[in-house]
Image (tube, grey):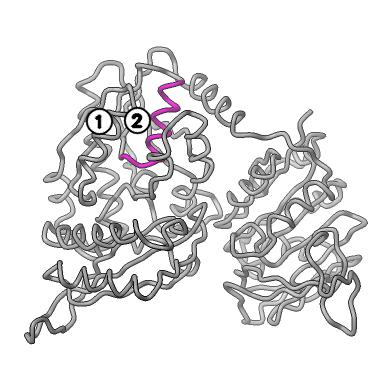
């Protein structure tokens, strides 16, 4: 019997990242609700339990909890952030504090006690014991919390701290209960994957049993199980990796019952329409129907400035166009979308999750629809989607293409979307991306684009006063879209990009570079 790890979802933005980190180590992980029956946690195949973070505070009424008998099952449990606080709150002797001192972003963790969680992480001076009050190990971690554990439960030992948090990690080794105030799942925590590895293989003692081949087989089996042989599917193809992998997966599962539609909504980048048609014709044996809908989308967006309203309009308009086209085809009952889990998380679909921004194909879907929705990649992250694409035989040109949002340039134009603004942004964005193709940091970039804000500023061109738009440049590194860091583009390259944009795009007189990580920012501006 293959063992698995249960990840209890308290609504944290990183819950799926935790599950994915476990899968990366070759162990099956399953996300469950805190309301799950206790018997489910007690099953023999459950090797360990992880309590995720979450946006709630245990000091508030209605904060999510869990059956405290879970700590008596004898299963190894790791509490992360809110999960650690909940553990301390439920177990005898533990106490929380809301001191008003929050910790967000990078922090320096000092490990003061030996712990199996930190086994194999380099100790200072090669020593494995604390000397003169110095820490055994120090590493940079990622914090995101307001509340803290003020007093550990009975039988627990404090094993690490930061400058702001006296109890940053604790454990009761005898009962196999562990807690971390920081987030080992995010990229910015040093040796985070090693901490998970220690929990899985040393503490839970599981073996590797999960692979991309199994994911592919499971997805195809699920599609066949949920669709009858009479069901036809129409897929909204955007040219990006998510919809391309969805198309390849569905075609392998249902063959010619899949029809692909490419909607030109007028919000694409320079040369995008031609590129999508060319790539699809060369790489897919599936007919592609192109639908011209520029005027329809721009008319719907006229005068709209609020970003959530834009997303809702784009989402509904997409669906209505698909429904209209599906009526012209025979046997179409499903609309397939390339939704991935970062879309779902940011749209706040989980019971405990907060909405950061809705995505046009998640929060933007209308309540009444003629077609049923199928989203085969809904529980996968971008890197898993890319691995699945490789397994399905898609070329690198498609698999490693930079992400491009479904709402397109509409969410890279702050404020109202107009033809004039689209033309300005397309030209500036094309210059930026062209220069990055020859950049020394090209391989570090997950996503790069330009943003046009709804402001103007005074400038000088040819000794004459100008009153033009600024262009904001954004380039980030990431692997999962849940966290990201800004790319350190060399100054001389930024200088060249800025001069080219200002000289070539008449309406632009200023260029700035966004150096915000995620969190606290998001990758896209809207």
Residues at marks 2 and 1, CA–CA distance in whole angstroms: 8 Å
Mark 1: give few (<14), some (14-19) or many (20+) Cα within 10 Å. some
User: Which label number is shown at residue 323?
Assistant: 1
Q: Position of residue 500 (x, y in %)?
A: 21, 69
- Any magenta on residue 281? no
What residue sits right under mark 2 in the picture? 335
Q: Is residue 463 above or below residue 252?
A: below
Q: Residue furthest top?
A: 229
Say which residue appears at 31% left-offset and 21% top-offset. Answer: 332
Give 329 or 107, whichever is nearer the viewer.
Answer: 107
Which quadrant of the figure has residue 296? top left
Query: Which quadrant of the view contains residue 107?
Result: bottom right
Q: Residues within 10 Å of mark 2 (few under 14, many from 20)?
A: many
502 sits to left or right of 138: left
Secondary structure under the numbered disc 2 in the rendered image: strand
Residue 244 belongs to the span the image colors magenta: yes
Q: Secondary structure at mark 1?
A: helix
Q: Which part of the image, by quadrant, shows the N terminus? A: top right
Asked whether, in this view, residue 377 is left or right of residue 18, the answer is left
Task: State which region is magenta.
Answer: 239-252
């Amino acid at each position: 019997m293959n063992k698995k790890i249960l990840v209890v979802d308290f609504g944290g933005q990183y819950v799926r990242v935790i599950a994915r980190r476990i899968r990366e180590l070759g162990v099956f992980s399953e996300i469950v609700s805190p309301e799950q029956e206790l018997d489910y946690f007690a099953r023999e195949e459950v090797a360990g339990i992880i309590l995720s973070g979450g946006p709630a505070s245990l000091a508030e009424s209605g904060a999510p909890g869990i059956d405290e008998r879970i700590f008596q099952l004898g299963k190894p449990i790791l509490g992360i952030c809110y999960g650690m606080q909940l553990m301390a709150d439920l177990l005898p002797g533990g106490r929380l504090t809301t001191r008003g001192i929050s910790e967000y972003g990078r922090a320096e963790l000092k490990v003061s006690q030996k712990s199996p969680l930190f086994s194999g992480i380099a100790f200072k001076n090669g020593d494995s014991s604390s000397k003169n009050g110095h820490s055994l190990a120090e590493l940079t971690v990622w914090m995101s919390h307001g509340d803290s554990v003020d007093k550990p439960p009975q039988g627990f030992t404090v094993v690490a701290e930061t400058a702001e948090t006296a109890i940053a990690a604790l454990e009761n080794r005898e009962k196999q209960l562990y807690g971390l105030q920081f987030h080992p799942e995010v990229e910015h925590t040093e040796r985070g994957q090693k901490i998970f590895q220690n929990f899985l293989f040393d503490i839970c003692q599981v073996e590797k049993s999960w692979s991309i081949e199994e994911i592919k087989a499971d997805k195809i089996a699920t599609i066949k199980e949920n669709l009858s042989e009479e069901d036809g599917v129409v897929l909204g193809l955007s040219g990006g990796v998510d919809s391309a992998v969805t198309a390849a997966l569905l075609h392998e599962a249902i063959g010619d019952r899949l029809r692909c539609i490419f909607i030109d909504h007028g919000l694409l980048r320079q040369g995008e329409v031609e590129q999508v048609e060319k790539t699809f014709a060369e790489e897919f044996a599936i007919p592609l129907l192109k639908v011209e809908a520029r005027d329809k989308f721009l008319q719907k967006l006229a005068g709209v400035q609020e970003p959530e309203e834009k997303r809702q309009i784009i989402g509904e308009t997409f669906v209505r166009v698909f429904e209209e086209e599906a009526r012209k085809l025979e046997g179409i009952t499903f609309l397939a979308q390339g939704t991935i889990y970062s879309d779902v998380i940011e749209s706040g679909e989980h019971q405990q999750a907060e909405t950061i921004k809705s995505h046009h194909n998640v929060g933007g879907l209308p309540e009444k629809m003629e077609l049923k929705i199928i989203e085969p990649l809904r529980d996968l992250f971008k890197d898993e989607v890319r691995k699945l694409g490789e397994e399905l035989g898609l070329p690198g040109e498609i698999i490693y293409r930079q992400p491009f949002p479904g709402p397109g340039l509409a969410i890279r134009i702050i404020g109202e979307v107009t033809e004039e603004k689209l033309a300005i942004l397309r030209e500036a964005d094309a210059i930026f991306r062209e220069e990055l193709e020859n950049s020394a940091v090209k391989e570090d970039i997950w996503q790069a684009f330009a943003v046009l804000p709804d402001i103007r500023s005074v400038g000088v061109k040819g000794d004459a006063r100008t009153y033009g738009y600024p262009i904001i440049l954004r380039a980030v590194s990431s692997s999962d879209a849940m966290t990201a860091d800004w790319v350190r583009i060399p100054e001389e390259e930024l200088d060249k990009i800025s001069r080219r944009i200002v000289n070539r795009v008449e309406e632009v007189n200023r260029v700035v570079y966004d150096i915000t990580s995620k969190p606290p920012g998001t990758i896209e501006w809207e």
